[in-house]
Image: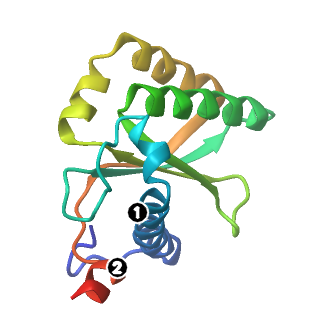
Amino acid sequence: MIAPGRIYSEAALDYMMAARAWFCRAIMLMQEKQSDLARTGFQQRPTLMNDAVLSLAILEPLENKEAETLQLLREFYLFMATKGYSHDLLYRDAKNASQFVHLRIWKSNEARHEAQEDPEVHRFWLRLPEVCVITTAHQNLELLFSSVELAAE
């Protein structure tokens, strides 16, 4: 969330604006793929007003660990979707190819808490520092508004 009076770097503002845009795009993709999401725990069409919780992280693979980072994240994303905890998206920063932008749309706060207690999730989290560094993490982004929401008014 952007704090009034705080000065942000251009890169930080780019990430915040991109996160908002990616979240809106993720919602639209999820709406288009409702049937696929139903099998992974999203039983109803997601909207901006439901219980979904957005998290964002900036990841930088360790030297010579990009392939391993991507493989681990693929496995982790599939696991999280199969368990019905979240829908995850991974982007590469076009301005800085060594950075990945990870977006996680938790099914709900309850799903997030359930995942946090899942030993299998902890096994993935423990492996992350072996392949990458998380330089920025936002665990619970609060949506102020979106173009999707505004267009529906």
How far apart marks 2 and 1 lie (CA) works out to: 9 Å
Q: What residue type is labelled 2?
A: Val
In the image, 6 versus 115, the foreground residue is: 115
Q: Which amino acid does label 1 sit on?
A: Ile
Q: In this view, does 49 lie to the left or right of 63?
A: left
Quick one: which residue is furthest to the front in this view?
35
Residue at (70% x, 67% y) in the render: 94
Q: Is residue 36 left or right of residue 90?
A: left
The kind of secondary structure element at disc 2 is helix
- Residue 92 in the image, given as x and y percentages of width and height: 66, 57
Q: Is residue 63 depicted above or below 91 in this figure?
A: above
- Quadrant the C terminus occupies: bottom left
Determine whether label 2 and label 1 are within 8 Å by CB: yes
Residue at (42% x, 61% y) in the render: 31
- For label 2, count other residues whose C-alpha is less than 10 Å away and answer few (under 14), some (14-19) or many (20+): some
**Number of disc labels:** 2
Q: Is residue 15 left or right of residue 92?
A: left
The kind of secondary structure element at disc 1 is helix
- Residue 137 in the image, given as x and y percentages of width and height: 39, 47
Quick one: which residue is furthest to the top in this view?
119
- Residue 9 in the image, given as x and y percentages of width and height: 46, 74
Quick one: which residue is furthest to the right in this view?
64
Q: Is residue 36 depicted above or below 114 in this figure?
A: below
Residue marked by disc 1: 27
Q: Is residue 85 depicted above or below 147 in this figure?
A: above
- Quadrant the N terminus occupies: bottom left
Residue marked by disc 2: 148
In the image, 125 versus 29, the foreground residue is: 29
Residue at (27% x, 73% y) in the render: 2
